[in-house]
Amino acid sequence: MGSENSNLEDKGKRVVTQREYLEWMALRPRLNDWSAFVAYKRDKCNQLLMQEYIESFDKDSYLPLINEPYLSGDNEWRWKLNYEMDAPRLSFENKSTDNNDNDAEVNMSMAVLGGIDIHVNDTYGTEVTLIASYDPLDHEALEAERVPLMDVTGAVGEDGAVGLNLASAQSQRYIWELKGPRIEHQRRVAGAFFKRKFREAGQARSSFKLGQVAPTDQAFLNPSKFRLRTVMPTGAGTVGSPNYGDGALEIRIAMKDELVGGTPGEDWLYPIPSDLPGVDASLMLSNKMLMEKIIRKGVVQAFNAENMYMTSSTDGRGFITGLKASPPMGGAPQTFYMNIPTTVHGTESEGFLVLTDVLFAINFDMDSALTISTTADRRISLKLGSRQSTQAISGLIRPPNEREFYQIRGGRMALEVIGEYVFGIDPEQGKITVEMDLPSISVSLYSSDSVSQDFIRKFEGDLTFIASLRKSVHEALVKIFSTLDDIDAFVLHSLLFNSTDAVQLKTVDAPGDLVSFGAISPRLTTFSINNKNPMVGHGGAITFTTTPANFEGLTWSVHNLDGTTQGAGTIDANGRYTAPALDQIGGTYKRVKVTAQGPAGSDGKRPVSKALVTVAAKAITLNPLVQTCKATKAGEGDESRQFSAGSLQGSLTWTVIGDGTIAPTTTGRTNTYIAPKEQDVAVTRKTFTIDEVKVTNGQQQQSSFVVVTHDRQTLALSVQVNVQAGQAQFECKSNGQVVPEPNWRCFPETGAGSIDSNGLYKADPNSHHQFVIITARFEMMGFFLGDAFFIQPLPVMAIPPKPAPEAPQTLADDDRGTRPIE
């Protein structure tokens, strides 16, 4: 087998058969000083993670609202107002084409569910240059595509919660970006800002909860620290390959009070065999944990001897192959007894033998010491006792044709037991079973009393009687050695998943380390809501379906994230959900959970699947609401601005009312506005114009406005706000002097409030607008002397002062290398 072993060593992360995998495991310990290991096919893992995300999502899943500015450039800052971030979602990817371990990564994304984004510039005085209003239809998203799993060690908290701390230095090592801005520098400065908000949020809010360690009384299964990484099988990074995109998530686990282990070597195999249909998960327990913490514990329990001392032997491969009861170094031998209650009856004509109390002792001599060792057929054998070593027994005999029982005097018994621990699967409990098989039990009886001796000698050759005695001893020993705990595999799977049936075990072997292959959540294919994360408008309806369809006995329910049902909408027996009315939303959106339950199965459990529904307050969202843009200069490239829009239904059509242009349709959510040519102020008597960008889905429409600047403003506007009164006092100056009685106007002209001749703006308390454009124009004796505009956020608020710069993100660890920041 030497050449075959060499080939196995060279397989790298190739997918191999189960037989080849077990042969590879038999070469040496494979867990690199970790106690346990689990792995899942990445696509199934991500699918189940989404279901777990939905099931665990509640009102406390969000980060605190963000109300803070950050510096985005030398003269620019962004003001995030009532910014509400979604709970972080993780998916496990590996984009490496060469299986470089350092490319293992977790992708994190956080959507902006609601909030105002205000851009401020102070190049020529503090002014607002853009206002956007986000909701679930159209929003930015924070993305961290380089959270390096090799460098992130997860931890289990005191409450058993499992998470990755996204505020840690390792998690923030690579570049984070806020997707939305076209300029990379602005995206990365925003990423630095959100890194800081994670650090400030505290561990509870900056940690992504993966699972909750399942409670167990198995002291040896106490996960404390773990490390994640992803791997790809050979060829999975090549476009066109049959397995393109395949991959697996691996989790290595250290128990309480253990040090973390190392990284697997180059000969590491892909953890899912190729020839096991339906198998997409694997689990390993180290040989050391198996022998020293599981098998040894069972033997100690059998003899009720917590202070039993056992020495271990290790073979040339590095496996613990034996445990032996021995006296401590320099200590006196101790004796531990095992009680074997045994009763063997003969017949009236044959006589009776009753063994009432058999205390079997562990000896420390070379021949009969308790010994545990691994076998060639991947089992673990147990041997104790000896045919040459006898121990005193007590009991009664009644010779044939006699009526009286006689106490055995000087009775002794030799007992030799050779058994095997056999591993199995309990599919109902999701456990790896450890049972005792005792194929060989040798029993011999002796007595110095003549009556007992004659009786025993008479029955020594009676195979039926000896078989009965052996059977009785066998039953007693199996019961005693069955004190070994079944291995609760869910404790390990609960690091990532909360569902007790997250993984169904299929096989178990112990070629050295113990390994079990299984299937991820049969629930995903046996019963599931098909649309798990839909969006619907207020008062709208959507019909949910399940797999399988027309599930007999199916029931539906809907509730808010806090568990209440008031204002959550309704759902009928056919799965048709009707969303709440607009006045029950109380913002730009609300979220509810829809639950489908099937009838109870043979185990009494009802299959459950859930969907997280987002109810939107608007049918269309267009962003930004307002922004500034320079006019296009003759002979130079077009000045442009980016728009994005989302609609609950229907395709979008774009138009511009004004001199700018925009494509009438687009394949995605974004479209580009092209500013008009620069106009001669001497002719137009305007330094700016306002274009309206409109988008419609055929039924509803939304508008945005672009203030196009054709020349530098010759007037300057300043403002003092009274937030409580909803008022803003504007002042207009030219060359530092107050302009007498400029022509004040506000835009939009209806619904945005009013401004009087003294520049006092009063907001409309019933307005739905989130901004107003205040304009001032100064003419004297028919001559145009200047104009100006000021974008004022609504409700009325003061612009925050310029913030300090963020700690910069660097490209040092970014695999995109030395590409300059734009």
Image: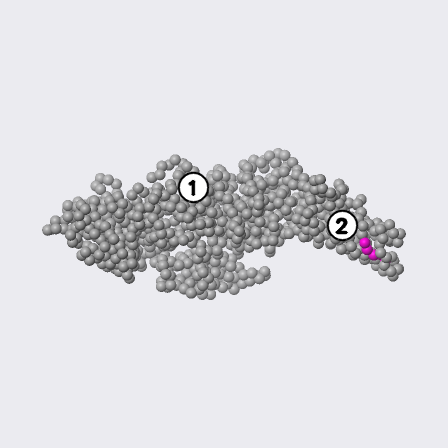
Circles 1 and 2: CB atoms closer than 8 Å: no
Task: Give the CA distance from mark 1 to mark 2.
Answer: 63 Å
Quick one: label 1, few (<14), some, or many (20+) residues within 10 Å?
some
Between residue 113 and residue 311, name the one nearer to us. Answer: 311
600 left or right, relative to 705:
right
Q: Position of residue 240 (x, y in %)?
A: 46, 41
Identity of the residue drawn at 75% across and 41% down: 366
Mark 2 is on which residue type?
A: Phe
- Quadrant containing the N terminus is top right
779 left or right, relative to 610:
left
Between residue 662 and residue 787, name the one nearer to us. Answer: 787
Secondary structure of residue under mark 2 = strand
Identity of the residue drawn at 67% across and 47% down: 296
Q: Position of residue 32 (x, y in %)?
A: 57, 40
Q: Is residue 43 visible?
A: no
Secondary structure of residue under mark 1 = loop
Q: Position of residue 201 (x, y in %)?
A: 42, 50
Which span is picked out in magenta? 394-398
> What residue sits right under mark 2 in the picture?
360
Q: Which mark is residue 551?
A: none
